[in-house]
Image: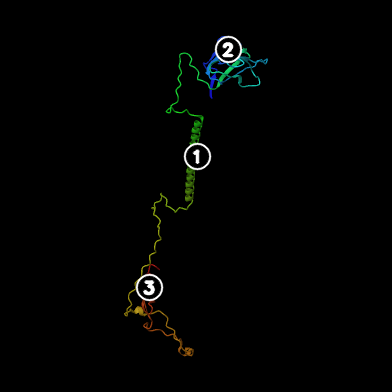
């Protein structure tokens, strides 16, 4: 089943010049008696439909028209506007009973300045043949070839728009994630710098002072041991000063009854040979040790 639509500005529709139709609005007229006709080719069984509308006068009067199509019964159909419908209306419908060239005529029977008649379109549904060319112009219809590119359908356009929107959304999400990651890294570095600035730094000498900056030692210095004092070797030949020992005489135990007869039991020691040898010789060498300690800078 083929389908064809003839609009009100199609050259297949011929409008009468007297009474005239509105040149600024194709298919509309306010003149009673205005006529229009359309010629088309079609086979048997074609369903012809005519759509249009009109305006209602303040008194409630409506426009009307009559339609004539060959091979259709009744041959004349009277139409009047339905005031309950706000959109275009089906003015005429007929199924032709024979094939070939057909003639449709429209006659406006009632119209004025307050009741305007408007023709919108003519629809041909069924086995419709292509219309014959008008004038000297010839129309050639070539079958589609395999090399011809198919026209874009609304579904393809919608799919392209959807793909573009998805790609744009993904890119926007990536940009937002990258910005968030950069902000987190920046905040982390700021916190690390603040924590490091709170630590106690070692004292540094002022650059305006005369004392040169000396770096602090990284390792503890090992304290040096005091110099060892070497004494002269111990010998048998000693000076008379060394023989003079200031030690008290050794204690000799005795009978307490002899104190009244002999006095104190302490006896002076006449020789230091009996004392054990020391680093300073026999007898302890306290005089030498005391003299050396007084002269030593470490004391």
Say which quarter of the image contains residue 29: top right
Say which quarter of the image contains residue 102: top right
> Split into 4 quadrants, where in the image is the N terminus?
top right
In percent of width and height, residue 285 lies at 37, 77
| Mark with earlier residue (1, 2) | 2
> Split into 4 quadrants, where in the image is the C terminus?
bottom left
As drawn, 39 above or below 223: above
Tell which of 227 and 156 is nearer to you.
156
Looking at the rendered structure, which numbered label has been put on residue 35?
A: 2
Which residue corresponds to the image point at 60% horizontal and 13% vertical from the top-left?
108
Element carrying mark 1: helix
| Mark with earlier residue (3, 2) | 2
As drawn, 187 above or below 248: above
As drawn, 141 above or below 288: above
As drawn, 37 above or below 201: above
Looking at the rendered structure, which numbered label has been put on residue 245?
A: none
Which residue corresponds to the image point at 39% horizontal and 70% vertical from the top-left?
294
Distance, label 1 to label 2, CA atoms, is 65 Å
In percent of width and height, residue 176 lies at 49, 40
| Mark with earlier residue (1, 3) | 1
Element carrying mark 3: helix
Element carrying mark 2: strand
In percent of width and height, residue 184 lies at 49, 45
User: How are the colours assigned in the image?
Assistant: rainbow
Q: Which residue is mark 1?
A: 173
In percent of width and height, residue 254 lies at 46, 88
Distance, label 3 to label 2, CA atoms, is 158 Å
User: Residue farthest to the right?
Assistant: 59
Q: Which residue is mark 3?
A: 291
Q: CB atoms at circles 1 and 3 under 8 Å apart?
A: no
Tell which of 110 and 276 is nearer to you.
110
Say which quarter of the image contains residue 69: top right
């Amino acid at each position: 089943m083929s389908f064809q639509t003839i609009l009100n500005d199609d050259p297949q529709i011929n409008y009468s010049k007297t009474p005239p139709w509105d040149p600024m609005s194709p298919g509309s007229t306010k003149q009673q008696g205005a006529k229009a006709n359309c010629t088309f080719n079609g086979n048997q069984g074609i369903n012809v439909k005519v759509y249009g509308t009109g305006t209602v006068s303040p008194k409630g009067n409506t426009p009307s028209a009559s339609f004539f199509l060959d091979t259709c019964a009744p041959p004349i159909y009277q139409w009047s506007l339905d005031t309950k419908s706000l959109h275009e209306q089906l003015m005429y419908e007929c199924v032709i009973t024979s094939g070939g060239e057909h003639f449709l005529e429209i006659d406006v029977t009632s119209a004025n300045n307050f009741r305007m008649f408007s023709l919108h379109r003519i629809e041909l549904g069924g086995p419709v043949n292509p219309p014959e060319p008008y004038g000297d112009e010839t129309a050639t219809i070539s079958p589609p070839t395999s090399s011809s590119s198919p026209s874009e359908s609304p579904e393809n356009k919608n799919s392209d728009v959807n793909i573009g929107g998805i790609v744009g959304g993904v890119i926007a999400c990536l940009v937002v994630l990258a910005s968030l990651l950069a902000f987190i890294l920046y905040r982390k570095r700021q916190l690390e710098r603040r924590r490091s600035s709170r630590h106690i730094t070692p004292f540094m000498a002022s650059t305006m002072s005369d004392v040169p900056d000396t770096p602090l030692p990284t390792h503890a210095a090992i304290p040096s041991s005091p110099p060892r004092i070497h004494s002269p070797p111990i010998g048998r030949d000693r000076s008379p000063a060394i023989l003079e020992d200031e030690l008290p005489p050794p204690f000799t135990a005795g009978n307490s009854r002899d104190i009244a007869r002999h006095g104190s039991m302490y006896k002076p020691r006449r020789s230091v040979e009996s004392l054990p040898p020391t680093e300073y010789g026999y007898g302890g060498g306290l005089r030498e040790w005391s003299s050396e300690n007084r002269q030593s800078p470490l004391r």
